[in-house]
Amino acid sequence: MTVAIDALDELARPEYRRDPYPFLHWLRENDPVHQTKFGFYLLSSYDDVFYTMQHTGTAFTVPDETSIWRDIPPDKHHHPSISKQIAAFASKNHPHYTRLRSVMARDMTAARVQKLRPRILEHLGDILDGIAPRLAAGETVDLHAEVSTPLTQFVFADRVGVPTEDKEWIADTIALMMQALVTTDEKVVLAADEASDAVEDYFRARVAERRADPRDDMITRLVKVHDGYAPEDDKLLIAILWIMWMTGYESTISGIDRGMQAFLSHTEYRSWCDGDDESKVQAFVEETLRHDGVVLYTPIPRIALDDVDMSDVTIPAGSSIRMLLAGANRDPGVFPDPDRFDPSRNTHRMLNMGYGMFHCSGAALGRAEMAHVLTGLRRRFPALTSAGEPRWSDIIETRIVETLPARLA
């Protein structure tokens, strides 16, 4: 079916930045395999999205560096900030990538996340202590800037092995580089070029430190495995560190933001966050991720290796495909009454965190941070309420808030 609209244009509209789900429902029912104006396909049905995830590596592959460049405007091709990000994401095709990725996965098992709990709670306690007097005085607090962002910075620094005093600089610099991919402002891209060199030098220095002085952190564990098979070339090792910060940092902040938004919006379920029953807190987290996840559609495409039929549409071999996770997670064929927030529902088929070798290695840690924040807010600020609409980022691949104002009722 030919539809005289472009989904990307629709999703960029202000009303769909706030709430894209009416359009996603329409798309799934009328054009579930939608070809965008840029040529790539958007999948919105659960079955098509799951099939693509399940068969990545057989029927589909992730793009190499050449195919990724095709989606980048020509005027950005000479910028090092862009080329370094492209090279990092293309490293997923490297034959040794899975070895290093397995280090990250082992580092984020449920048992290890449990060991991190005291530090997470310590950081969170300090953060909530900091905002408590202002909330008590009737002030409005931006939960994005003052809760989710600093907590993620502290935990990421602890986890990876970055000194606490460097955490904000690294985070701000990586954010600037990611902005370079979507901005039309040449000054921003030039600033990102300079920043990208500084970050690469920084990571190389940390790698050299860990070779000379191993520690109990992820950089050390990555170096140990890397040096067992490719000690002469640190490009892949640096790429892994790039990817970790570019994909894990912002998504963790946004996941916590989404949990806090659900806490503010669905007051009838706040008792689930009391913390007396950890399974209920986790159920609230899972339903939050299903009901309004961070990723609208996957930023890294899949490439069809052969012609493939989906929802009565033939996608030609070589086509670029992206998956509308937000649409799949509200598919009524899988989740009855999908627009209703209900933490008692079964969410085990949710697709937010990827699948197989592309499952998010930091999922357990992100969920734990969300749960601790929700419990902390419930216990410390049970009367917390929204103080206005959040401000949404213009990046349409994700649903990221830039401000999340709250106050005490």
Image (spheres, rainbow, N blue to C red):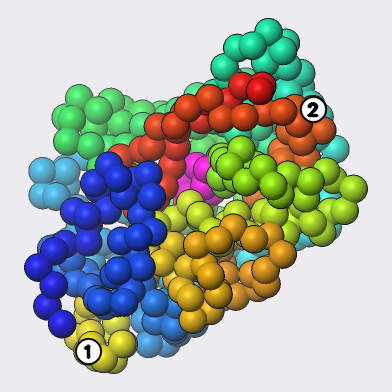
Left or right: 370 as drawn, with respect to 56 = right
The mark nearer the N terminus, 1 or 2, is 1
Residue drawn at (62%, 46%) of the image: 266
Q: Residue furthest top?
A: 137
Three-letter code, disc 2: Arg
Left or right: 378 as drawn, with respect to 91 = right
Three-letter code, disc 1: Thr
**Residue located beneath label 2 in the image:** 380
Q: Nearer the viewer, residue 94 or 167?
A: 167
Examine the residues drawn in magenta and state their main secondary structure: helix
Quadrant position of the C terminus in the picture: top right
Q: Start and end of the magenta stretch?
A: 241-254
- The Cα–Cα distance between marks 1 and 2, rounded to whole angstroms, is 54 Å
Residue drawn at (44%, 62%) of the image: 326
Decide: few, some or many residues near mark 1? Use Cα within 10 Å; few <14, some 14-19, many ≥20.
few
Q: What is the count of numbered marks?
A: 2
Magenta span includes 244? yes
Do we see residue 199 in this rendering?
A: no
**Residue located beneath label 1 in the image:** 314
Q: Which element is circle 2 on?
A: helix
Q: Nearer the viewer, residue 24 or 69?
A: 24
Numbered tag placed on residue 80 in the rendering: none
